[in-house]
Image (tube, helix red, strand yellow):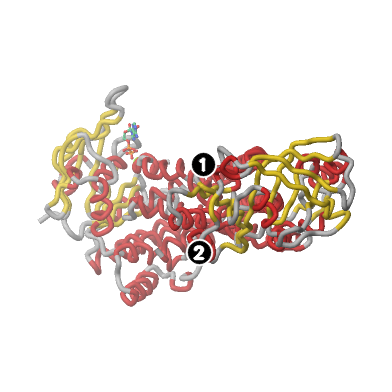
Amino acid sequence: MKQLSKLAWRNLWRNRRRTLITLASVLMAVILAIAIRSFQKGVYGNMISNAVSFSTGYIQVHTKGYWNDQTINNSFEAGRQVQQALNNTPDISLSVPRLESFALASSGQHTKGVEVMGIDPAKEQEMNGLGKKIVRGKYISNSDGQGILVGDGLAKYLHLSLGDTLVLLGQGYHGTTAAGQYRIAGIFHYPLDQLNNMLVYLSLPDARSLMAAPNRLTSFSLMLKNPDDIDKVTTSLQHTLDSTWEVLQWPVMNKTLMQEIEGDNAGGIIMLGILYIVVAFGVFGTILMMTMERKKEFAVMIAIGMHRIKLITVVILETIFIGLLGILSGAVLVFPVVLYLHIHPLALTGAAAETYQQFGIEPLLPTSVDPRIFLSQGITVLCIALISALYPLWYINKFKLAETLKQ
Amino acid sequence: MPVIEIKELTKTYNETVVPVHALNGVNLSFEKGEFTAIVGPSGCGKTTLLNMMGGLDHPSSGQVIIAQEDITKMDTSHLVDFRLRNIGFIFQSYNLIPVLTVRENIQFIMELQGRSKKEIDERVHYLLDAMGLSDKINVRPKYLSGGQQQRVAVARAMASKPKFILADEPTANLDSKSTETLLNLMANLNEKEEVTFIFSTHDQRVMDKAKRIVTLEDGKVMNDSNSGVLHETA
Ligand SMILES: Nc1ncnc2c1ncn2[C@@H]1O[C@H](COP(=O)(O)OP(=O)(O)O)[C@@H](O)[C@H]1O
Ligand SMILES: [Mg+2]
């Protein structure tokens, strides 16, 4: 093997210029591929973490069937089993209880359908900084008689201001009538009109008494220490909780975001595909030339007693050397750039920035420094290089000894 | 017992299209310690014959028996090992491995044979000394003259301690001085160490050095000095 590596290494530098050009093309492709991936992953991570913290969390736990039929009758008792299951899963950084239902909100002449969300204000604050969205009045705490938080859109529609009273009327747990009146404790503003116009928050105790659902919840929204653990946590919860529960991940619950990411991702993959083709042709051309111009040399080596498989090994080693040199130097060159942009993300400006803000996402383009990006790009490029060497390898295995020696 | 025995050997190229009968029933045998020239006009079948004897190509019919084994029946993979253990090759255009130094070129084949480092070192020095190239040990082939390269090629062929060495027109690319040096070295090795050399040539001076001359014509043995025929016709 030492002998073969020596041959391969020296052969590589026989035509220094050609090898350097090939290396440069691999290197450029690796740099671009890692940069593209790192931006995409970084931006998606940012979008997802923003989006899930304003809505479902990475994972939600419900009674089985709740997601398809979101009524208070599909709520669950916040009992020990589920609490323990969540507490015993160390990868969960936060579990946020909610009790959600729909009601009619009216004030004087005006009525509007709203989504009533019973929350643990401290936990909600931790998850998405809800308290900071209050533009007038005060945030609430987790006890009864706290009053209600309404969006500024709804407040305007119902002509409400701080201290006014809002009447909620809806269906409570198991067919009871839910009715109550609440003082406006705070008015919040979200970047999304949809939320401003139809969302109201009560403390959990207030929501529970309104809906006649003591100690009940419709969901736990879970935040994770590391979003990559989402599958692991899901599986482990599905395992611990029995079949009366459902454990759903954000892509199921937020299809729009998922589709947006998938669409953008597909664009990135096409770019990568083009880069890979560049690598493939560069390596293919070089290895093919290196093989063809050494035909006779190869024939001589076989004649004096070298097995073809050893020659094939030499060419594979040459390919691996080119691939690894290009990949490693590319990764080393691009890493500081990616790291810098991870710590100091590029900021979006103008219309793009506004769109982001409307979705509740910081208008930043952070890169990801996930080592798996480097690893997967490296492995992919190496595989492509090796696949490009298949034809030369096949040729080595097939060429006619006596005829080649004569040339 | 002969080192090589060739029986009724034929080789037809392009069997399906325009058949070329390169060898037409050749019978020959070679003993240990021979210094034999295969001669004849261009196209008479010298290269084809040497290729068959070296196991580099398969004949159309007939046998090539080396060390009691008919190599025409061996599969290509066995043939590689067989060549490595039994046959030395010298080529017309030297064909050293350009990325390896003189020492490495000679080592190469012994490393393939799996010989010990000590044995390899000793033999490299011995052979380079015999070839008068000790001062070129760490030089790459492109810095050597043609004659020097061909001497390295002889050393390489000898390195594996083969039963015999085949050389297809080894002097065709050399000037007359280099030709003479090379042949003297080969003749010397043949004398002192009983190395068996079988080479093709159409150079009269090379033939003059040969102990035995086999003349081919149209793929047949016309004359063989061992059977005395050459003297009658000469
Ligand atoms: N690969 C081949 N395909 C077809 N014909 C060949 C091939 N190799 C050699 N020949 C023919 O076989 C005959 C013998 O060739 P060769 O053994 O090379 O002769 P020499 O070495 O004596 O010049 C010639 O007529 C030559 O044209
Ligand atoms: Mg010839």
Q: Position of residue B63 (x, y in %)?
A: 15, 42
Which residue type carries mark 1?
Gly
Q: Position of residue A370 (x, y in %)?
A: 62, 59
Q: Which mark is residue A65?
A: 1
Give the residue displayed 80% in from the left and 39% down from the top.
A106
Q: How many marks?
A: 2
In the drawing, does residue B120 fall left or right of residue B135? Answer: left
Above or below, B189 against A378 in this view is below
Give the mark nearest the N terminus, 2 or 1: 1
Within 10 Å of disc 2 (Cα), the crowding (few <14, some 14-19, many 20+) is few
Q: Position of residue A350 (x, y in %)?
A: 88, 44
Front residue of this view, candidates B176 and A288: A288
For the residues beneath circles 2 and 1, the answer to whether they share a chain is yes
Quadrant hosting residue A139: bottom right
Above or below, A212 against A324 in this view is above
- Given the current orientation, which residue lies at the most extreme left position? B1
Secondary structure at numbered mark 1? loop
Q: Are marks 2 and 1 in contact (CB under 8 Å)?
A: no
Within 10 Å of disc 1 (Cα), the crowding (few <14, some 14-19, many 20+) is some
In the drawing, does residue B113 fall left or right of residue A15? Answer: left
Which residue type carries mark 2?
Gln
Q: Which mark is residue A84?
A: 2
Quarter placement of the N terminus of chain A: bottom left
Q: Position of residue A264 (x, y in %)?
A: 67, 40
